[in-house]
Amino acid sequence: MKFNNILSETTKGLTTITINRPSKLNALNKETINELHQAFKIAEEDRATKVIIITGSGEKAFVAGADISEFADFSIAEGKNLAAKGQALLFDFIANLTTPVIAAVNGFALGGGLELAMAAHFRIASDNAKMGLPEVSLGVIPGYGGTQRLPQLIGKGRAMEMIMTAGMIDAKTGHNYGLVNHVTTQEELMEFTQKIASKIMRNSSVAIASAIAAINAGFEDGENGFDAEVTQFGICFGTADFKEGTTAFLEKRRADFPGE
Ligand code: COA
């Protein structure tokens, strides 16, 4: 599929989706959000894709936010619709994918950019990364899940401070806060992220899908994460991957998961 604002390529089970508007610091306009939705959907439905990496093109930015030029004159209803649609189409969509998504944060991750990174299952940053939710400096609040996912990841007090000050934190602080799992140099970011992806790929993709569902359930209103874990644990016992994984262990060989 041909995209105008993103690149998507798949090799050896890994799909890399790159937001490609470097002259606008990869800001998320409507078309980019729609294209990202399509690209993630295609990768999710592609059985060959075991892990997805999301990153930004250029040396400066992951994503510098939602495209401010597109919503500056919106009404209350349009603003509400912007957040609701964006969450459904992209941010919640990514968070609930069965395929693991890693954000490789290669520079500015601001506003919708940090929200995109936080919707991924985990994050790795290069040492030039700068992360923040500056929305209140524009007279608005984060609308793509930022008020929920930031406190989940770094704690309420730190999230309150970051959102209220509209400030940016660097990669080291993001690492201390647990917002990013690892920090690398800019040159090493993709290779390091790919190495983690390849470790994930050795494991059962169906079990990983169950793990994502159980972990996410604990953060959903009205759901009991422990109950979800019991259900997903049970489901694993009916899979060919479970049969292969346990058989391979008992036969002292490496598992070759069929992925079903
Ligand atoms: N929406 C739309 N365009 C954006 C953008 C955004 N969120 N972030 C950057 N851009 C555009 C700039 O308008 C500029 O375009 P131009 O060259 O046509 O004028 C281009 O990207 C480069 O950005 P610039 O501001 O010149 O780079 P800088 O190095 O001076 O500053 C930032 C970098 C990230 C500090 C600055 O771009 C910024 O503050 N961006 C907005 C961040 C934000 O508030 N995001 C939250 C949105 S809800």
Image (cartoon, rainbow, N blue to C red):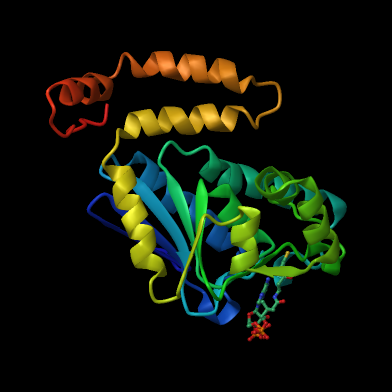
Residue 149 position within the rendered picture, expressed as x and y whole percent measured from the top left: 67, 46
Residue 25 position within the rendered picture, expressed as x and y whole percent measured from the top left: 58, 76
Q: In the depicted view, which residue is nearer to us: 184 or 142?
A: 184
Locate the N terminus and report the quarter of the image it occupies: bottom left
The residue drawn where x is 36% and y is 53% is: 196
Classify the position of ligand 1 by quadrant: top left, top right, bottom left or bottom right: bottom right
| 180 displayed left or right of 149 | left
Q: In the depicted view, which residue is nearer to us: 59 or 24?
A: 59
Q: Quadrant of residue 64?
A: bottom right
Q: In the depicted view, which residue is nearer to us: 106 or 156?
A: 156
Residue 13 position within the rendered picture, expressed as x and y whole percent measured from the top left: 26, 49
Vertical side of 86 occupied by 222: above or below: above
| 129 displayed left or right of 79 | left
| 156 displayed left or right of 169 | right
Vertical side of 123 occupied by 72: above or below: below
The residue drawn where x is 41% and y is 32% is: 209
Residue 112 position within the rendered picture, expressed as x and y whole percent measured from the top left: 66, 60
The residue drawn where x is 78% and y is 46% is: 156
Locate the C terminus and report the quarter of the image it occupies: top left
